[in-house]
Every structure is written in C-alpha cells, then in structure tokens.
Image (cartoon, rainbow, N blue to C red):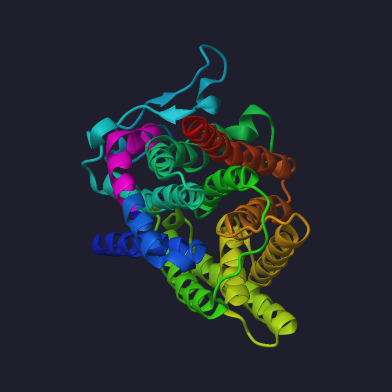
Amino acid sequence: MISDVALSPIWPLLAASLGMLMVWGVAWLAWPQAKEDAARAALLALVWAWVGMAATGFALAFGGIGLLIDHPDLASLVWEWTPLRQGDLASWGMAGWMGFGLREAQTPLAAWLLFTALPGSALVAVVSMLSLRQQGHPWAAWIMAGLSTLFLAPLAINWTQAGGWLMHLGQSVAAGQGYLDALGGSFFLVAGGAGWALWLARASDSPEASSQTEVDRADGWAAGLMVIAGTAWAIMSPLVLWQPLGPMQAGLNLWLAAATGGFIGAIYGWYTSGFFANRWLARALVAGWVAALAPALWLTPWQAMAVGAIASWLFILVDEGLATWLNRADKGGFVAMIAVPAMWGALAVGLFLPDPGQIRAQGIGIVSLMLLGFLPAALVLGLARWRKG
C-alpha cells in the first residue's frame, strides 16, 4: 500500500516536472521542420493541462479513487458517477465527481496524483494541437487542446487507473483481471486515436520532402528528451510504487524495449540509406518505449526486448506503408509512432498474462480509448472545415 512507501515529497515533484519536458520531445519529434511552432504548442498544451486539471480534470479522473484505495488523504474522493441506476454500480463508473476546482486535492497524496496526471494530459493535448495545426486549423487546435485536458485525458485516467469501468471488466463481463495499464500507455492510445482521425482526413500527398539533416538532428534530440523525461515521469507514479521493486523493474523494461526498438530502427536506416539515419533510430526507439508502457510491470527483460522489437517493426511497416502504398505520409508519426505501438503494448499485456479473458479486456480497452480520442477529433475537424466553407 502507498502508506508503506517512505518517499521524500521532493522526488515526485521533480519527476513530474521532468516529465513535462516529455511534451516538448513529442512536439519536436512530430514537427521538426517548425521547431518554434512545435515548442509553442508544447507550452500551450502544458498551460491547458494545468487549467484543465484544475477546473474539471482532477475531479473526473480521481473523484472516486477513494472507493478504490483506502487512504486518509483520499477519504473525500468517493463519488464515482455511473449512468446505471441499479445492478452492479461499482463496476460501471464512468467519471469521478469530487474535486472540481481542486477543492478535495489539498492533501499530499491527492497533490501527487495531480502532478503525475499533468504530463500525460498535456501529451494528449499537444498531439491533437499539432495534428490540427499542420492542417491549417489553429482555432480548432486550441479547442481540441481544451477538450483533451478538461475531459478526454481525465476520463482515460479514471477508466484505467482510478476505479473506472475498464478496470472492472473482470467483474462485469468476466474479462480477465479487467483492463491493465501499468505506466500510462492509455494516454498514447487517446492521443493516437485523435492523431489517426486527423490523418484520415488529410488529402493524399507525396512523402515530405524536407531537409533530412535538419529533421534528423531534431529527431535525435527530441527522442532522447521524450524517453528520458517520460521514464522519470512514468516510474514515479504512486500507482507504480505500490508494487515491490516497481520503479526499478518498470524502468529497466522501458529502457530495454526502447533500446531494442532503436537498434532495429538504426539497422533499418543503415540498410535503406547507407547510414544510421536519426529519423529511423529516434522514432523506432520511441515506438519501443511507448509499447512497453502498458505491460512494463509484468514483463521479464527478454519479453520487454521482444515488445520493443515488434513495436519497432510495426512502426517501420506502417510508416513506410502509409507513405508508399497509400501516398499519404504520416508526417507527425501520430499513427505509426504513437497509435500503433500503444495498441500493440496494450495487447501485449493480454499475451504475457495468461489469465482467461485478458486479451478480451485489453481489446475492449484499446477500442474504447482510441474512440475517446478519435471521435472528438473528427468532430472538431469537421466543424473547422464547415466553418471554412
């Protein structure tokens, strides 16, 4: 239990602050040709994350976590909203309903949960913003960022980590242990769903013809920043610290998956271009890291490397396929680098945990979280195009 963890309060704060740098890594990786615009989008996403989590996000995410975790700091967070009026109400919670305006977040553990939610919330916002910004819809990007931090990311937290319905699929529909996500891969599923919707709406074009040297340099820095900062953020969640050796085991598996993915990307880049292109190295490394987030606590080191290797090859196949076969390049990597590895990582939980029905639970979670990002993004883009005429 968290009450047994002796930890200086400065470390969660430092880890969450470092994790916010992950948002700049994602932004630069997605839009290396416009680094100033990408950095501005990252900063706006963080602003939205703070505003959104303070207004509604904390309540929607953690408003019912006191029903799941018996701890004095969470004693006032005990209202989980459900649309049902009878039956198994506890298994169908859809959103927390306490803590609006951070009124019930004035305890150390509640503040810790808030800090750990901020980088993931900002990540969903920045992916949505950049997808819309690249298509010439700046006001729609601003609206989508608000939706991401006020509602979408908090709901993903609630459903997967704070007592929501996906966690209880084992009781409600006899699907394994319910949906499992160790370190926040769900954020990338929601972000990937939004990115996928906006990629589908793009017109067909040819692969991007930009300066490979400039893109490579930005990709290398961005990937390093994202993986280093993101690992610090992921392993310092109190949900991880409940597990024996949780942070060390999870951190090791994240790095092994990322390194294996990066190695395959480097070899592929050398094979296709004659040199170790940073683009393939960096993005394949990130794909391996993203895939390992969901199953990190349940993998052996060799399994973590297998997860990273498969994620790397999936990234390469999808990225090349979209550009070559469909003539519609995935310029920001939102589909190939984020959505597909996140889907594979969530599915890997079911493959490596042999509980009956676990793959079913993971499949329900993948579809639900992808739609949570996909449908609002498609709606906002449709409104933006209608407004433009």
Vertical side of 389 occupied by 145: above or below: below
Which residue appears farthest toward the right when viewing the image?
325
> Would you say 140 lies left or right of 389 here?
left
Vertical side of 277 occupied by 334: above or below: above
> Would you say 342 lies left or right of 41 here?
right
The residue sitting at 25% across, 59% down in the picture is 9
Image location (x, y in percent) of residue 72: 28, 39
Vertical side of 157 occupied by 353: above or below: below
Vertical side of 320 occupied by 147: above or below: above
Image location (x, y in percent) of residue 152: 46, 38
Q: Is residue 82 visible?
A: yes
User: Does 52 lie within the magenta span?
Assistant: yes
Span shown in magenta: 46-65
Choose top left, top right, bottom left or bottom right for residue 270.
bottom right
Image location (x, y in percent) of residue 25: 44, 66
Q: Is residue 256 visible?
A: no
- Number of marks in the rendered image: 0
Q: Nearer the viewer, residue 59 or 274?
A: 274
The residue sitting at 66% across, 37% down in the picture is 364
The residue sitting at 72% across, 40% down in the picture is 360
User: Does 242 lie within the magenta span?
Assistant: no
Q: Nearer the viewer, residue 271 or 87?
A: 271
Q: Nearer the viewer, residue 117 or 274?
A: 274
> Would you say 222 lies left or right of 372 here?
left
> Would you say 137 lies left or right of 15 here?
right
Which residue appears farthest toward the top when viewing the image?
85
Image location (x, y in percent) of residue 38: 40, 60
The residue sitting at 68% across, 79% down in the picture is 269
Which residue appears farthest toward the front when viewing the image?
389
Main secondary structure found in the magenta portion: helix
